[in-house]
Amino acid sequence: MKLTFGDKMLQFWIYLFLTLLAFVTFYPFWNAGVISLNDGKDTMLGGITFWPREFTLENYKIVLQDERILNGFVISVSRTLLGTLLSIFATSLLAYGMTKRELMGRKYYMIMCVFTMYFSGGLIPTYLLIRELGLMDTFWVMILPGLVSVWNMIIFRTFFAGLPAGLEESAKMDGCGPWKTYFFIVLPLSGPVIATLSLFTAVAHWNEWFIPSIYINNENLLPVQTILRNTLNANIMTEQMSKLDPQAAARMAGASNVTTKSLSMATMMVATLPIIMVYPFLQRFFVKGVLVGSLKE
């Protein structure tokens, strides 16, 4: 199809807008990476934009040698893998039950689930509940309270409802019970939606820092994102102190080429890159899975 001059101009402005949007979105991450690769003392002078002015790997060397960071990285990986697996299993199982018309009170269960999407008990009642359940200062406090996602359950239910009813009927005729049907028929056919929601759940687990900061006092159980948050807070405090006492800040900067800001940027890169690297492996399922909820309700 031959494009007119107007069509070509429209495409040009669309591509220009998308290029600028991509640049604005990607630049903060790029700049953080540049600062993490730049000498900390030189970074304090400002003007670091697209390339390191004084390249160094000292920031990453210190971060990767920090036992708190390495331990937090292990906690984050364990939490993300286990939390995603258990959450997808529990949420999909609930959604599968919600598709059964013979389930008594199915509408009332659905109303109760949707109600929790809009209303919650609040932070203080939740804190008291977590304490009474004995989950304080445990690894499971980062997994069990958010085990079931109602939004993901609705997407799962929509996908399951769209599967041909004849599949389950054939499975029953072959002697499959509900559990076998769920594990060997329904789940294998749900690859796109499982991959998409697994990515969403994994990203949520990996980036979540608030729950550990409230319910965990044991430093050995803190995930890397909470440690990063503490590092960023220390960076803010250091900047405030430098404004109050510039001479003391200059003496501290002169003692080492590594600063709190350069370390925080290096920690952020270490904490962010692993979850970004997961996306290419799930990309082929992503578009199909993310549109499930808009196809049939």
Image (cartoon, helix red, strand yellow):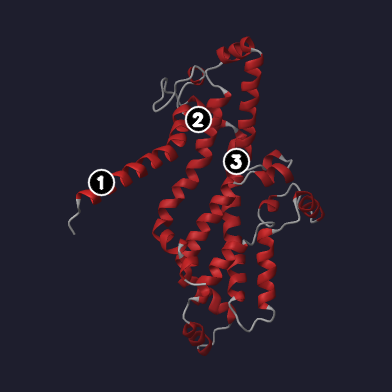
Q: Quadrant of residue 104?
A: bottom right
- SS for dot 3: helix
**Closer to us: 164 or 80:** 164
In the displayed structure image, the side of residue 74 where residue 20 appears, left or right: left
- Residue in the picture at 41% in, 60% down: 287
Residue 107: x and y in percent read 66, 76
Residue beneath disc 1: 9
Disc number lying in front (2 or 1)? 1
Q: How far apart are marks 1 and 3 (CA)?
A: 45 Å
Please name the amino acid that badge 3 sits on. Answer: Gln
Residue beneath disc 3: 225
Earlier residue among tags 1 and 3: 1
Please name the amino acid that badge 2 sits on. Answer: Tyr
- Residue in the picture at 68% in, 40% down: 220
Q: Is residue 5 above or below residue 289?
A: above
Residue 12: x and y in percent read 27, 45
Residue beneath disc 2: 60
In the displayed structure image, the side of residue 131 where residue 53 appears, left or right: left
- Residue in the picture at 73% in, 43% down: 214
Q: Distance between the residues labelled 3 and 2?
A: 16 Å
Residue 225: x and y in percent read 60, 41
The N terminus lies in quadrant: bottom left
